[in-house]
Amino acid sequence: MASIWKGSLAFGLVNIPVELRSAVRSAEKLSFRQLDKKHQQPIKYERVSSVDGKPVPWGDIVKGFEISKGKYVVLDDADFAAAAVEMSRVLEMTDFVPADSIDPRYFESPYFLVPREGGDKAYALLRDALAETHKVGIGTFALRNKQHLAAVKPMGDALVLELMRFQAELVDPEEMRFPDSDSVKVRPQERAMAVQLIENLAEAFDPSKYHDEYEDKLHEIIKAKAKGKKLAVADAREPEQTQVVDLVSRLQESLAASTGGKRARGASKQAKGANKSATRTTRRRTA
C-alpha cells in the first residue's frame, strides 16, 4: 500500500517520523456507463454556457461562489493559495481524550500510521501509553491542501489515524423525533425478553459472514443476460410492521426460535404474564 503522506507525530517535545497508508481498500464494484438506448453506445457530455449554449473550453472555465441568485464571486489560483493552511509535516496531538467519549459519527476514514526509519521506539512508546490510558490523541494536520481533524488510537501493534468530521458537519439529533421514556412505555417483561433474545443471538463479530448480496446478484444477472438468458426477479415486499399488541407474542416466538424451542422457565412465565396484560389492554381498547 503506497504512502499518501509523510511527516511526524508530535506530543509534548517528542516527534515520531511516520507515514500514512490507507487501512481500507475499495472492493471491486460494478461500474455502469450511460448508453444511447437506440445504438447502445456511450453518450458524451459537453460543457456549455448557460447563456449562449456554446461549448466552453477548459481554459475559459473558472470557479465561482454564488453570493446571491445569479451573482458570483470568482476565485483564482492566488485566492486558493492565500486560503491554504500551512503545509506543516507535523500532526501535533494537542489533546488526549477518553477513547469512548467521542461520538462515532465524527470518525470518517481510517489510515495506518507506519513508523519511518528511527521512529520505532518512540512509536511503540506512544502506542503503549495510549493503550494503557485508554486515550486517543486529537489534533489537526494538512493533507492534500486541506486541513483535517484527526484522532490517533492504538490497534494491536499499530497506530491508526482516523480522519474526523468537524462539529459543524454533524446533524443535531434535536432536529429529529425519537421515542422517549415518557411517550413510550416499555414494560419490564418486554424489556427482559428483548434482552434475552439479544443474549441468545450474541456471538463474536465475524466480518467474513457478511457480503454484498446485491452486487453478487447483479453479477449473476449480467452473466445471464450476456448469454441471452433472463433471471427471475423476486417480488420485493415491504415487511409487515409488528403491531403493539403483537409485540410480546413476536418476542416470545423469536425467543423460541433462537433457543431451539427451549426457553428459560422465567422468560416463559414473563411472556405469559405480559401476553395476558397485552390481551387485557386490547380488550379495554376495543370495549
Image: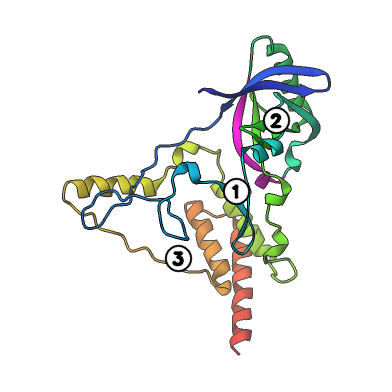
The image quadrant of residue 178 is bottom right
Callout 2 crowding tier (Cα within 10 Å): few <14, some 14–19, many ≥20: many
Q: Amino acid at mark 2?
A: Val
Check the image and tell me how it is coloured: rainbow
Q: Is residue 9 above or below residue 266?
A: above
Q: Which mark sits nearer the N-terminus, 2 or 1?
A: 2
Residue 191: image x %, image y %?
A: 66, 60
Q: Which residues are magenta?
A: 103-114
Q: Amino acid at mark 3?
A: Pro
Point 60% across, 51% down: residue: 64
Residue 231: image x %, image y %?
A: 23, 54
Q: SS of the residue at dot 1?
A: helix
- Tell us which disc is closer to us: 1 or 3: 3
Specify the label residue 239 is tagged with. Answer: 3
Question: Seen in the image, is 233 located left or right of residue 267?
Answer: left
Residue 129: image x %, image y %?
A: 77, 23
Residue bearing the label numbered 1: 199
Mark 2 to mark 1: distance in Å? 33 Å
Residue bearing the label numbered 2: 152
Q: Is residue 220 above or below residue 125?
A: below
Point 67% across, 21% down: residue: 7
Q: Main secondary structure of the magenta part?
A: strand
- Residues at circles 2 and 1 in contact by the CB criterion of under 8 Å: no
Using the image as rendered, state which of residue 274 and residue 101 is in the foreground: 101
Q: Which mark sits nearer the N-terminus, 1 or 3?
A: 1
Asked whether 90 falls inside the magenta stretch, the response is: no
Q: Is residue 266 visible?
A: no
